Image (cartoon, rainbow, N blue to C red):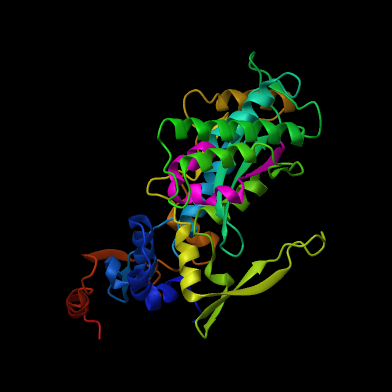
Amino acid sequence: MGLTIQSLLQQHLDRFSQQHPLSSDMLGAAVRMRDCQTAAMGGHINSCPDGHFHQIAYNSCRHRCCPQCNCLARVRWLEGWKHRLLSCPHYHTIFTTSHDLLPLWRYNKDVFADTLFAAASQTLIELLRDPKYLGATVGLLTALHTWSQTLAEHVHLHVLVSAGGLDDWGCWKEPKKSCLLPRKVLMIKFRGKFRAMLLEKLDRGELVVPPDTSEARLRGLLNKLGRTVWNVKILDRYDHGEGVATYLANYLKGGPIGNRRLLCEREGRVYFRYRAPTQSGSDRNRQSVTSLAVDDFIARLLEHVPPRRFQAVRGYGLYCGNQHSRLDEAHEALGKALGLERPETEVAILSVEKFLESIGREDAGKCPTCGAELVSHGHFEPGRPPPLRVIRLLEQKRGVA
């Protein structure tokens, strides 16, 4: 078996945690990823009801950064959002924060991220409610990413924006132009809001000033950044938002890097694939290989563990998810405008059986001898060995050799 995040942590985490300070969130995530689907997580016995087959099944850690146990959660998230997304084109916008603010990010992840979500969403909603641009309320699906392809810190926000919205009279309104907004207008308004919100939180004492700077220097940096160009992108319009939602799903569940990108560990370094940035459109997805020292790789990986109970995906406007979202009204208005039938109001949660069938593993929960559904029993607590006596008793009872 090739190199995985789990095998890397199993080999190096104990030493790494003794030599490097880790927050409780980082250490907790690392331990869970290391112990995922092992006896340390506890488990149960799966048995054929006729005694043909017995299987020890260890529990998954279910941490959002674990690359080996989030496949079902990813598919369920995507299925839910595919159902909620409006049947209209969508724009993909990206708001990137200055790398000069990374020290502030490290010491204020919750507050910094909340501010980024608020500044970007308010900027888009306010501009698009202006009759000069659209004059309607749009749907926003926002997702925070904090990493680059090489796991370096790169704090940016992906926003999926509906191309059209609901006006004050409940009618669907199409965009006036093919371009969502003037990029410079969007950048200036976002930059101003984000800086103003950070300064306000600094005044109220809600921000921790990094130890290598002072409050006065931080204010000076924020003022200086107000005169620079920020990286705000408005990508080409997509016929539907499902493509971008699929892209986001691949990043939101499973952590910043998957096992498929890992190549090997050699001479104290981890080698992995990444997409090299190029100027050529034809080579945009060209794969390259880089390496990091083992400790640097683990440090970068754990730096992107989100704070506990932190929401990395949020909806605003028509997609805000509460009773004020008007999403059902928007679906109905859009259906009338396009002559489409209104979608179902509820979507069934994807079952484990349907999921296994969709990936070609429909036999995973069945007896390989008779095809009967396996029955779970003999649960055991984390850190305890599987109760093998249960299997022996069942074998004796069923007369299985």
Residue 78: give x, y in percent of width and height. Answer: 55, 48
Residue 117: give x, y in percent of width and height. Answer: 54, 37
Q: Observer-nearest residue: 353 or 160?
A: 160
Q: How many marks?
A: 0
Taking 265 as reference, is 301 above or below it?
A: above
Q: Is residue 38 left or right of residue 341?
A: left
Quarter of the image for residue 286 reads bottom right
Which residue appears farthest toward the top when viewing the image? 169
The residue located at (28%, 72%) in the rendering is 39
Residue 244: give x, y in percent of width and height. Answer: 65, 47
Taking 225 as reference, is 74 above or below it?
A: below
Is residue 373 visible from the viewing direction of this image?
no
The residue located at (43%, 39%) in the rendering is 207
Does 26 appear in magenta? no
Taking 340 as reference, is 18 above or below it?
A: below
Q: Observer-nearest residue: 286 or 27?
A: 27
Magenta residue span: 87-116
Q: Is residue 287 left or right of residue 263?
A: right
Q: Observer-nearest residue: 299 or 244?
A: 299
Taking 283 as reference, is 393 above or below it?
A: below
The residue located at (38%, 67%) in the rendering is 20
Quarter of the image for residue 184 reads top right
Quarter of the image for residue 173 reads top right
Q: Observer-nearest residue: 270 or 318?
A: 270
Residue 279: give x, y in percent of width and height. Answer: 80, 60
Is residue 124 visible from the viewing direction of this image?
yes
Does 91 appear in magenta? yes
Q: Is residue 344 left or right of residue 31?
A: right
